[in-house]
Image (cartoon, rainbow, N blue to C red):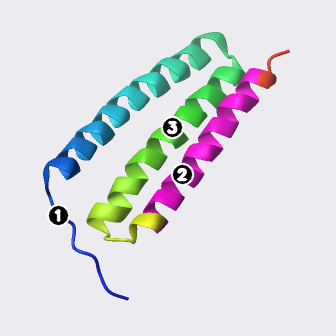
Amino acid sequence: MRRQVVEFDELFWFATIGRVAALVLGAFIVYLAYKGYRRNKSRPLLHVALGFTLITAGTILEGILFVILQVDLRAALGAGTMLTVVGFLSIIYSIYSVK
């Protein structure tokens, strides 16, 4: 299997800035949701925090796999997408678990 060469052009830096912004915003949402869970002991907020953690982790995982570990782009996107889907399922569960 041949390794692909990653070029650090303008598009790469634009995507990297987007991933860093997603990391910062995702971490802030996770912090707020977890803080709300601790204050109110609301299990749905815990699932929201978990969901956003997984969504943020999926975004970051794609970049780590592709750029640092030089995994094939399709595999990196697939792994990140799977984490994102599980994160969305956790958020959906939190919405429907409210009684």
Question: Could you give the CA–CA distance between mark 2 and mark 1, rounded to whole angstroms?
Answer: 23 Å
User: What residue is rendered at 14% in x and 58% in y?
Assistant: 8
User: What residue is rendered at 64% in x and 45% in y?
Assistant: 86
Question: Could you give the CA–CA distance between mark 3 and mark 2, rounded to whole angstroms?
Answer: 13 Å
Q: Secondary structure at mark 2?
A: helix
Question: Could you give the CA–CA distance between mark 1 and mark 3, rounded to whole angstroms?
Answer: 29 Å
User: What residue is rendered at 42% in x and 30% in y?
Assistant: 26
Magenta: predominant secondary structure element?
helix
From the top left corner, tell me how far across and down residue 78 is, in percent. 53, 60
| Residue under numbered circle 1 | 7
Q: Nearer the viewer, residue 46 or 75?
A: 75
Q: Residue flagged by tag 2: what amino acid is it?
A: Thr
| Residue under numbered circle 3 | 53
Vertical placement of residue 93 versus 9, above or below: above
The magenta stretch is 75-95
Which callout, 3 or 2, points to the residue nearer the camera?
2
- Residue 81: numbered disc: 2
From the top left corner, tell me how far across and down residue 37 is, in percent. 61, 18
From the top left corner, tell me how far across and down residue 85 is, in percent. 62, 45
Total marks in image:
3
- Which residue lies most toward the left here? 9
